[in-house]
Image (cartoon, rainbow, N blue to C red):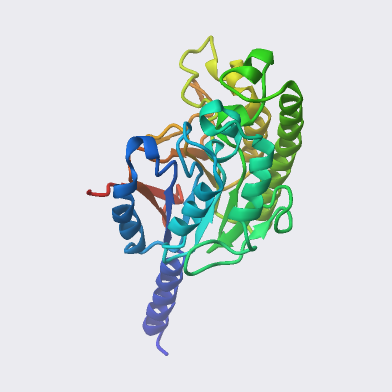
Amino acid sequence: MSPRLLAGALLAISLSCAQAQTFSFGLWGDMPYQKAGDEPKIPALLKSINQSDIAFSIYDGDIKDGSSKCTDDIYASALTMFGQMEKPMVYLPGDNEWTDCHRLNNGGYDGLERLGYLRKTMFPTLNSLGKRQMPLIHQAPVGEKFVENTRFNYRDIVFATLNVPGSNNNKVLDDKDCSNKSARTAAQCEAGNAEYLERDAANVRWMQQAFAAAKSSKARGLVLAFQADPGFDLPETEDKDESQAPKFSGYRNFINSVVAETEQFAGQVLLVHGDTHFFKVDKPLYSPTKLLTNLTRLQTFGSPLIHWVRVTVDAKNANVFAIEPVIVKQ
């Protein structure tokens, strides 16, 4: 083969490999909400996601609204909706399906009982949900504590999902917080705080293991997904960090640990969450005057905004992740 033909062949192979590493995935969550009348909008959403070219999607929590009851049929309905997804779909828990179930308008359930039910119901196997499934690495066996925390690799990117829900990560601040609009007893709140501490430590370990896996495989990027908005939008001034308020104290240990790992990671980190229900992309860490440059926050749509987000991983993109909101016409 002539040098020119050889160079052309090598270039074609190089371009082919680059294209092979380019793929897209979808992000959605915080829907449908009964109180917002979202149900009629869901078929168009599912059709939009199913007809796209994504490899898989991640649903970042909240299968119902925060003022409806946590009855068993809510979880069954969510599984039916997820079963309509043509591509693999990874689910992670939100606060509305367990943390907030103690509320009187949610039926006054024991939130820890609902968490146990969720773990057994929403994670029936070690595979993803959807008509086509993919294997996932779980932090625990089926039905056990922390089975909901998952990890997988896809074309040189590491993905990790974690049970970090809204409502201050299930941390109860005081007696007033315990009893406000709630059926909880003091003993249940004490048990809730013990659960928070145990799960927070497990979440940190799982996140650190995801970073270790990304480093060992020399991954160009890492995606961390959970449901809660940990107060990223609140630090607005140089002299006051509102995200340190007690109502966000349940996230501080985890977020500080994410920062520490990101600082030591050569690639890009995409931190995905829902909870606040409007689309936003920014770099919220460390502060307004100092930037953690290789971490990008992506906040997904939520009820009543029934849309989704398409993320393209591109080997030629220095930022690795190209983010596109997909507006679903109703």
Q: Is residue 93 shown above or below 259?
A: below
Q: Residue furthest top?
A: 239
Front-lying residue, 246 or 157: 246
**Residue at 40% of width from left, 40% of height from top?**
33
Residue 266, above or below 95: below
Point out residue 154 in the picture as x, y percentages from the top left corner: 54, 62
Is residue 302 visible from the viewing direction of this image? no
The quarter of the picture where the N terminus appears is bottom left
User: Which is nearer the eye, 29 or 117?
Assistant: 117
Q: Residue at x 67, y 55 (%)?
A: 213
Kindly give the residue lying farthest to the bottom in the view shown: 1
Q: Position of residue 171 (x, y in %)?
A: 67, 26
Front position in the image: 213 or 94: 94
Q: Nearer the viewer, residue 40 or 298?
A: 40
Q: Residue at x 67, y 34 (%)?
A: 257
Q: Number of marks in the image?
A: 0
Q: Is residue 60 in sight in this rendering? A: yes
Residue at the image position 48 percent from the left and 69 percent from the top: 132
Within the image, what quadrant is residue 243 found in?
top right
Q: Quadrant of residue 177?
A: top right
Spot occupied by residue 181 in the image (x, y as percentages of width and height): 56, 20
